[in-house]
Image (spheres, rainbow, N blue to C red):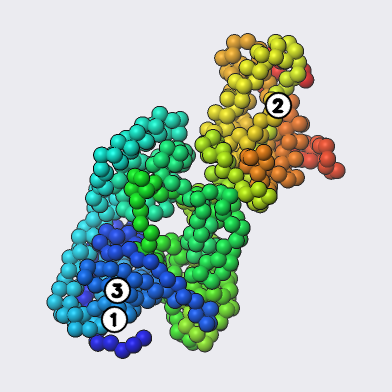
């Protein structure tokens, strides 16, 4: 880095009534704070170096100044401190560094915020000698007051922003869209609330809207909010996009407007790795406002803020040969040690003192235990490295392609959302429920084709309501049978049990011929494909699920033994009868759990 004038500094201390783990997620959300402070968006240019590392450059317009700088990756330890540095090649400053340290206090915590800057020219020297630190301090005082209000529950959002004002044409368009959303079965009375959110929220909230996060903020269940966002896409309030997330930084390095445009592989320039598509983990459906309602500009307010990667517990740079021990609290769980630069990784399970993080070039290892409440970091290599400790839990709020394609609202609204012809995707786990009507042939003969067809259609609607209520989707109907898919195994079993428990009431409502339903449920790995212009599932697991259904009597639910072992399913089938049964196409008997049928329903129906 080129030499520059001596650094100037300014320190501010703020007191909070909440502990560090409450204030940290707010204060360390540097992108949101930068937007609220009125700082401009900027585009990041990533430049790979000869040694495989990546440098990050940006440009932006700030008042009368055109700025250009190198963005140094932020360092931090969650709930403890962060350090953010920019090195300018254009503008009045040469360097700007912000450091925040959090200390617990008897009544909450204290934040010690230090700004350091060096001038690049005469204008920079004048700025630092006069108003720069005072103006920045006043701006931050205002933002901290907003954070205090939010942390105390006195405001709904961390920072209050001005509502977007629409012209008459857009206002009328939005009014029509909201009416359509609220009139749909997917609106759940939340259309107006979503429209207000689109007009009121910060751009940081809108760039990648995640329905689960929105539901948590609103105090709603997540399924109605997911369905709301899907409906809002169809009606023109939102746009959807499929993000292919990097498995390391978990950023959306590639986005597609439709499912069939999501490639099988992608490259993350920041991490310098190529990675595969995984519908169950790293293909996410997210949303943003439709440009016709509120355009959202591309760019970043802060690329490397700690809350842009909340799974990263610490990120600390070490010089060659440097060893450093940092205070850090790692809860029991699965973690990954790696470097920000291209290199290896090491997975560890922590239940006590954290093992040391040892890096030597591309090799990352876990060493002897650190002292309790700390993590010791060692760079034994010849180059500077940024050491990372991250939780291996995937993005908690992500709505994966695997999950959303098993929702009935998605299949109803976007029946044309399919994979590219000839494409197929491995699904690590999916639960399938197959149903069939007992004695359907005799039913048609007994009451006639028209009456039987009407009854079958009513039973399809009955099944559809229950499947949807349990976060599943009907994939297809085959004759009078149904195939339904669920992302969570327990949802499939609960849906099957609810179908059987409600069949007697369904028959009473029909006021005539009674039906009896046979159900089988199984879960396992599958292949997602496009068949007959519809997203479908294929593989031996699908065949076995259909065979399990064939073992059921009227009013029964038969669950595969493999599925019954799932921890979420075991309590639901504890009263069932375990047995081994032979199924067509499989040499060895298959273990199943048989949940008894309803004898009342059985007496009302003919055998078959």
- As drawn, is 281 to the left or to the right of 200? right
The residue tagged with tag 2: helix, strand or loop? loop
- As drawn, is 129 to the left or to the right of 171? left
Which residue is disc 2 drawn over?
Answer: 479
Counting other residues with Cα less than 10 Å from the Cα at mark 3, is it few (<14), some (14-19), or many (20 or more)?
some
Query: Where does residue 65 sit, x and y in percent of width and height?
Result: 24, 72
Tag 1 or tag 2, which sits nearer the N-term? 1
The residue tagged with tag 3: helix, strand or loop? strand
- Residue 574, relative to residue 78: is it above or below? above
- Residue 24, relative to residue 405: is it above or below? below
Which residue is disc 3 drawn over?
Answer: 67
Q: Nearer the viewer, residue 465 or 419?
A: 419
Q: Residue at x 32, y 59 (%)?
A: 32
- As drawn, is 579 to the left or to the right of 130? right
Which residue is disc 1 drawn over?
Answer: 94
- Asked whether the viewer can see residue 125, the reply is yes
- Residue 270, relative to residue 236: is it above or below? below
Tag 3 or tag 2, which sits nearer the N-term? 3
Tag 3 or tag 1, which sits nearer the N-term? 3
């Amino acid at each position: 880095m080129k030499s520059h004038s001596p650094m100037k500094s300014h320190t501010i201390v703020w007191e909070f009534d909440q502990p560090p783990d409450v204030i940290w997620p707010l204060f360390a959300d540097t992108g949101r704070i930068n937007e609220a402070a009125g700082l401009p968006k900027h585009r990041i240019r990533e430049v790979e170096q000869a040694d495989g590392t990546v440098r990050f450059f940006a440009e932006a317009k700030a008042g009368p100044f055109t700025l250009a700088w190198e963005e140094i990756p932020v360092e931090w330890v969650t709930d403890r401190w962060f350090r953010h540095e920019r090195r300018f090649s254009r503008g009045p400053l040469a360097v700007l560094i912000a450091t925040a340290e959090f200390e617990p206090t008897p009544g909450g915590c204290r934040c010690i915020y230090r700004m350091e800057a060096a001038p690049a020219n005469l204008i920079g020297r004048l700025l630092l000698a006069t108003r720069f630190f005072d103006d920045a301090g006043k701006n931050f005082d205002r933002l901290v007051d907003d954070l205090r209000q939010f942390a105390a529950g006195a405001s709904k959002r961390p920072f209050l922003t001005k509502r977007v004002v629409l012209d008459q044409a857009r206002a009328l368009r939005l009014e029509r869209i909201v009416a359509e959303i609220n009139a749909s079965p997917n609106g759940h009375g939340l259309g107006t609330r979503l429209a207000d959110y689109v007009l009121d929220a910060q751009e940081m909230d809108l760039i990648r809207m995640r329905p689960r996060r929105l539901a948590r903020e609103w105090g709603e269940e997540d399924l109605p909010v997911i369905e709301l966002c899907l409906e809002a896409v169809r009606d023109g309030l939102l746009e959807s996009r499929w993000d292919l997330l990097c498995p390391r930084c978990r950023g959306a390095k590639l986005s597609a407007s439709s499912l069939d445009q999501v490639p099988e592989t992608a490259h993350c320039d920041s991490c310098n790795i190529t990675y595969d598509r995984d519908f169950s983990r790293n293909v996410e459906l997210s949303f943003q406002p439709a440009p016709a309602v509120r355009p959202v500009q591309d760019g970043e307010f802060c690329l490397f803020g700690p809350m842009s990667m909340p799974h990263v517990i610490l990120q600390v740079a070490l010089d060659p040969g440097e060893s450093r021990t940092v205070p850090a609290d790692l809860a029991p769980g699965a973690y990954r040690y790696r470097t920000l630069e291209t290199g290896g990784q090491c997975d560890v399970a922590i239940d006590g003192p954290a093992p040391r993080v040892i890096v030597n070039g591309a090799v990352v290892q876990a060493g002897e235990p650190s002292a309790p409440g700390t993590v010791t970091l060692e760079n034994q290599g010849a180059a500077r490295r940024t050491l990372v400790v991250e939780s291996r839990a995937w993005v908690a709020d992500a709505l994966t392609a695997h999950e959303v394609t098993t929702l009935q609202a998605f299949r109803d609204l976007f029946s044309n959302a399919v994979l590219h012809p000839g494409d197929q995707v491995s699904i690590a786990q999916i639960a399938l429920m197959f149903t069939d009507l007992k004695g359907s042939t005799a039913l048609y003969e007994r009451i006639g084709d028209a009456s039987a067809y009407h009854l079958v259609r009513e039973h399809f609607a009955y099944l559809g309501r229950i499947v949807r209520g349990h976060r599943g989707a009907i994939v297809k109907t085959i004759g009078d049978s149904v195939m339904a898919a669920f992302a969570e195994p327990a949802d499939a079993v609960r849906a099957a049990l609810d179908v059987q428990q409600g069949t007697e009431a369904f028959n009473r409502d029909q006021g005539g011929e009674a039906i009896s339903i046979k159900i089988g449920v199984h879960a396992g790995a599958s292949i997602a494909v496009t068949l007959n212009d519809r997203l479908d599932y294929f593989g031996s697991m699908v065949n076995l699920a259909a065979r399990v259904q064939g073992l059921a009597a009227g009013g029964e639910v038969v669950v595969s033994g493999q599925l019954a072992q799932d921890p979420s399913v075991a309590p639901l089938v504890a009263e069932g009868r375990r047995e081994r049964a032979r199924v067509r196409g499989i040499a060895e008997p298959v273990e199943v759990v048989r949940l008894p049928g309803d004898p009342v329903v059985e007496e009302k129906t003919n055998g078959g």
